[in-house]
Image (cartoon, helix red, strand yellow):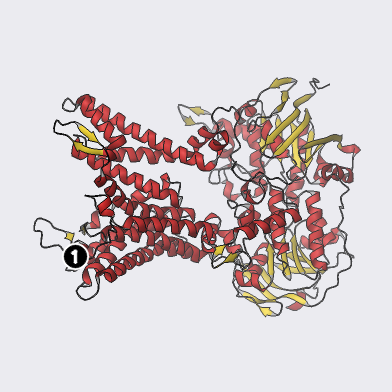
Amino acid sequence: MKGFLKKSGTTSVLATLISILIGLVAGSVLILIVGIFDNKIGLSGAWDGIRLVFIGLFNTGRDASGVMTFGFNPANFGNMLFRAIPLILTGLSVALAYKTGLFNIGAAGQYLAGIAATLFVALEIPTTVVPAWIVWTLALLAGILAGALWGAIPGLLKAYLNINEVLACIMTNWIAANIVTWLFDLSNLKNVTEGTKTAYIYKTSFNGVETAKLGLDKVFAGSQVNAGILIAILFAIGVYILMTRTTFGFELKACGSNRHAARYAGIRDKQSIVFSMGLAGALAGAAASLYYLSGNPEFFWSTYQSLPAAGFNGIAVALLGACNPIAVIFTGIFMSMLQVIGSQITFLTPFNEYITDVIIAVIVYLSAFSLVIRMWISGRGKKKPVKPAKADAKKEVKA
Amino acid sequence: MEQSPEYVIEMLHITKEFPGIKANDDITLQLKKGEIHALLGENGAGKSTLMSVLFGMYQPEEGVIKKDGKVVTINNPNDATALHIGMVHQHFKLVDVFTVLDNIILGAEETKLGFIQKKNARKKVQELSDRYGLHVNLDAKIEDITVGMQQRVEILKMLYRDNEILIFDEPTAVLTPQEIEELMQIMKGLAKEGKSLLFISHKLNEIMEVSDRVTVLRKGKYIGTVETKDTTKEELSRMMVGRPVQLVVEKDEAKPTEPILEVEHFTVPSKIHKNNAVKDVSLTVRAGEIVCIAGIDGNGQTEFVYGLTGLERPSAGKVKLLGKDITHATIRERSLDGMSHIPEDRHKHGLVLDFTLEQNMVLQRYYEPKFQKGGFIKFGAVREYAEGLIEKFDVRSGQGPVTVARSMSGGNQQKAIIAREVDRDLPLIIAVQPTRGLDVGAIEFVHSQLVAARDAGKAILLVSLELEEVMSLSDRILVMYEGEIVGELDPKTTTVEELGLYMAGAKRNNGQEASAS
């Protein structure tokens, strides 16, 4: 058991779990405080809220007498998986860049570029002429490509002009926001049928383009889930293999870890940086494509005043997953679970969904302290400091 | 006898274990007041661990530490500071963008209502620097002063905190010969003023010159303590390595054959000033010889090598490798054409410190069919290859091939680089200060490897700042001064003094290599 606790993999998972637990408790405390000081809510209302924070996924609504009921809720599960799609992919985008020594804060801009390319392709190519599945594929590829190109710009600036990628990313985010608004402004894709809505673009289902459901909608009845989640998981596995198994990943990591040494070893450092950012952008673009190609979301095209949250949520997902592509699958799903819980809280209690934002904030904040938590776990019950080495590695010393 | 109060610090029977390794095994170290005590040992002998124990960064499994005869417990570096123990680390702990004065008072600032009061501090630092001859501009930023000056700041930091026991961790590894000479004088001055100095080193010359007593460690074990005046370099190196060490390189007459590297009118612009760092250099290195570029640091050697290896672009001139023009080739192409490079800065260029040892071992070869198939790395082959190199070149590390390079001792990092470069078996080896920071045993090893490579018909271009190495290892010496080759010397007929005159720019001949213009 001791050896198990000392393993670096175990401790980092445990550290994450502890961060999550503290975050959930913090959210509960907040609910409790609000509940106590608000006569209309009271302790019982707060208790409902707290239960939702922890097991909201299993909530099945309220019965006739107004008591919350719990059980397997397929719609909640399905929606959790659906909302996880963009979170996993933007999380991967940030994680991949981070593993190669770059901080991709530009996922929001790459996401927007992906949305624009995807929607234009998905809506402008008539499915009466081209089969829908071809349009779908083209739209996905267009989104990935657009994200990649948009991500490559800060990469190019960093590699050839030594401009900090964070600054370049922030600027390209807003440039994307304005360009996208302008492009849709010119387009004829504005949703005119639903009169009360302004500044929205048609759903891709308007043109009959939708991600296949593969029967998932039967398993999780009443939800929006589709095959996109499987594609996102495949991407995660792909990124994991790329980074840990291939020579290309070796080059990218070497470059990120020590650009000078990589150059010395004959690796093209400038190209590697551009590739890293391009790949990160491609993942963010894929996030946008798969989200909008699900058929139902409508895009609010007047984005020049705000950036999509998906891009920044990716940072939280990646950090919580310690930038491990496989861990990102789980942290992405976890974050989307919190989003589902957020809507449950809004729907079923007087509290609002921003409670979950507080929880996410606390968790991300704590995950920055994960090293401290990890040391606490592995040093527990011992007065002597433990050498921070990978104890799971083969203990072979040639004397 | 162990109770004797003549010792300021006593570390008695210290044992410290790490998973898989006994870093310190029953080690005793006694430091007298006012002495310079050298701690000698190979890379990885346990010197750093012992000092970490003294600083409370590790707790020993066994043994006690006494200060002035009284047992003390040191749980963290703050305890050590409270006992007036200070240390100059090998890699300085300074804030680059702060001034010298700010760095000295950092952590021990005098404040009034929360505002820092620098007046008294400045006075005290000024007094200290006058008293010990540690002259340094207090208002200069750390990033603007030389490494030697930075070291003085570290020493002043210790003195400012009224430290009585001063530990110098391989202080000369980063210094030029002149700076080393100055440091020796400073250390002697400190000892005369009653400070007790612990001098960690594996450079025998310096130990002989400056220390009063020497304690020798080998592979974590205590070997003995001797009076410096009663011992010799040979005896110390035997104690340290455990066998007699060849302090002079043994090699036969070189039998140079065809030219491997031909450099013509090579010019590299400087990044610091407007002039060229390397001016119109022409030279030839033939198979089966070691050509050494000697010179004082900063005379264009670094830029010359950068230009040769493709890290920087030359502005004029031509480089031919095995007759092929590689002036504008990429680094990878040069590597494939037969150039291997032991870089000057092992942390900047030589290693990816956060990679494992095995990953570093294949840093330039991961793409070879031996190590990859269809873009996927063959981990088994990499592991096997790395284990082979570790065995063959005796690279010591905590966890073998999966050790993170950062956690290895400097000497073993260097050995890993040498292993990697020599094992590539390429016709040209460019070795820049290959023995920097190594102990005598390792130096002997590196020298014998380079001589063996030479005898196997490799061309070796050596860049070295160490006169001894230049004289003993090279077959021809080219002296570089202010970016030019100012002379070609034969190590068999020249003297160290003459070489020194060339290096200082006081003398020059137009040897055949330099006369090309």
**Which one is nearer the viewer's eye here, B275 or B208?**
B208
Residue position for label 1: A185
**Which quadrant is the N terminus of chain B positioned in?**
top right
Query: How far from the left and from the top, in percent, is residue B317?
Result: 65, 76
Query: How far from the left and from the top, in percent, is residue B514?
Result: 76, 73
Q: What is the crowding at mark 1: few (fewer than 14 residues within 10 Å), some, or many (at least 20)?
A: some
Query: How far from the left and from the top, in percent, is residue B387?
Result: 69, 54
Q: Could you tell me the amino acid type at mark 1?
A: Asp
Left or right position of B345 against A99 = right
At x 55%, y 35%, the residue is B106
Left or right position of B317 against A249 = right
Q: How many marks?
A: 1
Query: How far from the left and from the top, in percent, is residue B275?
Result: 62, 67
B258 w.r.t. B466: above or below: below
> Is residue A369 visible from the viewing direction of this image?
no
Q: Circle 1 sits in a helix, a strand or a loop, which is it?
A: helix
User: Residue B191 appears in which quarter of the rendering?
Assistant: top right
Q: Give me the chain letter of mark 1.
A: A
**Which one is nearer the viewer's eye here, B346 or B277?**
B346
> Is residue B378 visible from the viewing direction of this image?
yes
Q: Residue furthest left?
A: A195
At x 29%, y 31%, the residue is A30
User: Residue A51 appears in which quarter of the rendering?
Assistant: top left
**Which quadrant is the C terminus of chain B positioned in?**
bottom right
